[in-house]
Amino acid sequence: MCKRYLPVGVFDSGVGGISVLKTCADVLPYENFIYFGDTKNSPYGNLNEQKITELTFEAVGRLILSGVKAVVVACNTATATAINALRNKHKINIIGIEPAIKPACLYTPEGKILVMLTNAASTQPKFKSLVENCGVDKVSLLPLKDLAKLIENNIGNFSSLKSYIFEILYPYKNSEIKAVVLGCTHYLFVKDIIAEFFNGIRIFDGNMGVAQNLKNTLIRNNLINNSEGLGSIEFFSSEQTYEAVYKKLWQSIINKNN
Ligand code: DGL
């Protein structure tokens, strides 16, 4: 089969990457996608670097074996921890996701920005250098231990997390925060709750950056699927019962946007 008709693999520790998948499918509607979520081992954000690297290699290896033409690592934690090692090992194009700190800083030259992310991502040099480039004093970091898992456990009922989220954000009430950066793809599913807490503040995520990067990479490598007709999307999980859960969540995202 001509390489350009092969699917794109998208990977996250769990459901978070489905928000990235949506943006990628919007930007590249003719592409076929295979999604793999490692729900069985999530959250990655509380694991050590070696374990995150090991799991990421396993998941990406699995996608490559299934015959994808490119891989999107739709997980900030896995990207910050393992993307360099992944690219050294595999020849295939691998696209990662990074918190949109730079656009948020440019948006508010005077105000501060709040970056919400996992514990593991917050300690990675790749992430620290993003913060340093923006100015350490300008960025407030909020590493969270439980939010990704709570999102994973409350699919279909994200609004139940409102009081928990309001509580963790309480210290930032009436602060100088003028923008929020979502540094974990799971948090996209509670974006509205975060926006409500901050009275409609601007919230940044890395999803469009990833989708554009994927598109440019496919064009550059002559891998764009130019067949007409919508692409297919398949869902796989290390926790088999979650495959139906991912599909249901996907359907609800599609319905919400129609
Ligand atoms: N969705 C992942 C991210 O973007 C992390 C969630 C987890 O801790 O597994 O960082």
Image: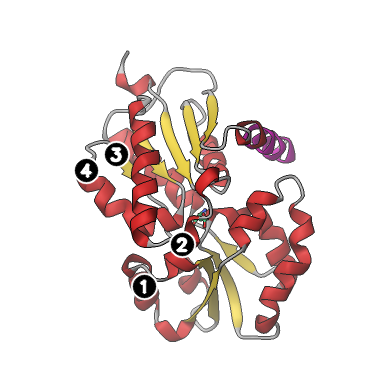
Comes first in the chain, label 3 or label 1 = 3
Q: Amino acid at mark 1?
A: Lys
Q: Main secondary structure of the magenta part?
A: helix
Q: Residue at x 73, y 68 (%)?
A: 164
Q: Residues within 10 Å of mark 1 (few under 14, many from 20)?
A: some
Which residue is labeled 4 in the image? 89
Comes first in the chain, label 2 or label 1 = 2
Quarter of the figure with residue 255: top right
| Extent of the magenta region | 246-257
Q: Residue at x 52, y 59 (%)?
A: 184
Which residue is labeled 3 in the image? 93
Spatial CA span between label 3 and label 4: 11 Å
Spatial CA span between label 4 and label 2: 24 Å
Comes first in the chain, label 3 or label 2 = 3
Q: Amino acid at mark 2?
A: Pro
Is residue 61 visible in the rendered structure shown here? yes
Q: Amino acid at mark 3?
A: Asn
Spatial CA span between label 3 and label 2: 20 Å
Quarter of the figure with residue 202: bottom right
Please state, as top left, top right, bottom left or bottom right, where the C terminus lies in the image: top right
Q: Examine the structure image and report whether residue 158 is included in the region drawn in magenta.
A: no
Please state, as top left, top right, bottom left or bottom right, where the N terminus lies in the image: top left
Indicate left or right for 114 with 71 as reference: right
- Give the answer, above or below, for where 52 lies relative to 180: above
- Give the answer, above or below, for where 24 lies relative to 65: below
Which residue is labeled 2 in the image? 99
Which residue is labeled 1 in the image? 128
